[in-house]
Amino acid sequence: MTQFIPSPYLCPICQDSLNLTENKKSYCCAKNHHFDVAKEGYLNLLPAQHKKSKEPGDSKAMMQARRNFLEADFYQPLAQAITNLVDQHYPDNATKRHILDMGCGEGYYSRQLSALSTHASQLDFHCLDIAKNAIMAAAKKHKEACYIVASTTNRKFVTLLTRP
Ligand SMILES: [Zn+2]
């Protein structure tokens, strides 16, 4: 019998809870909607019928241009300021905290937070973007985080994630 591991995600089709399969290769809900984890490690929770275009979000060229700009560290002071806020407000008795990075793009800010935070090992990253190429690029660089292709406008999808 297959064992399932509860996850903080909701099925984008029926909004039921998604569980990770024992082999950690896919997620499924009680109504048997399946979502496989890609070989790059990301999860695609944007069903074809929810896409408004063939390639939603930034194109690959736009994503690469953004990555080149961000990796030149022009916005590093902002990433440091975000990290300082997270560290200042990190509860003394907390074990794990979820970080929800909505519209994460190619993952620069979550990677920075993961590298700079004094609580990095206790941060559980859930990073969403509608651009599949950006999520794929992000997942390759930040293996500890969960990168998910999803629409951030679907409130039902994020409700579970925003619970304490
Ligand atoms: Zn479902």
Image (spheres, helix red, strand yellow):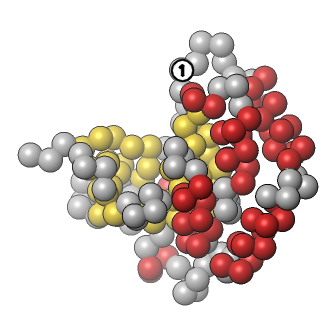
Q: Residue at x 23, y 61 (%)?
A: 32
Left or right of residue 133: residue 35 = left
Left or right of residue 10: residue 135 = right
Q: Residue at x 24, y 60 (%)?
A: 31
- The residue furthest top is 93
Which three-letter amino acid code belongs to the residue tagged 1?
A: Thr
Q: Residue at x 57, y 28 (%)?
A: 122
In the rendered image, is residue 56 in sight? Answer: yes
Q: Is residue 72 above or below residue 161?
A: below
Residue 56 position, x and y percent, is 61, 79
Residue 138 position, x and y percent, is 60, 59
In the rendered image, is residue 154 in sight? Answer: no
Q: Which residue is mark 1?
A: 95
Left or right of residue 39: residue 58 = right
Residue 107 position, x and y percent, is 66, 56
Q: Residue at x 90, y 44 (%)?
A: 77
Residue 74 position, x and y percent, is 90, 55
Q: Quadrant of the C terminus?
A: top right
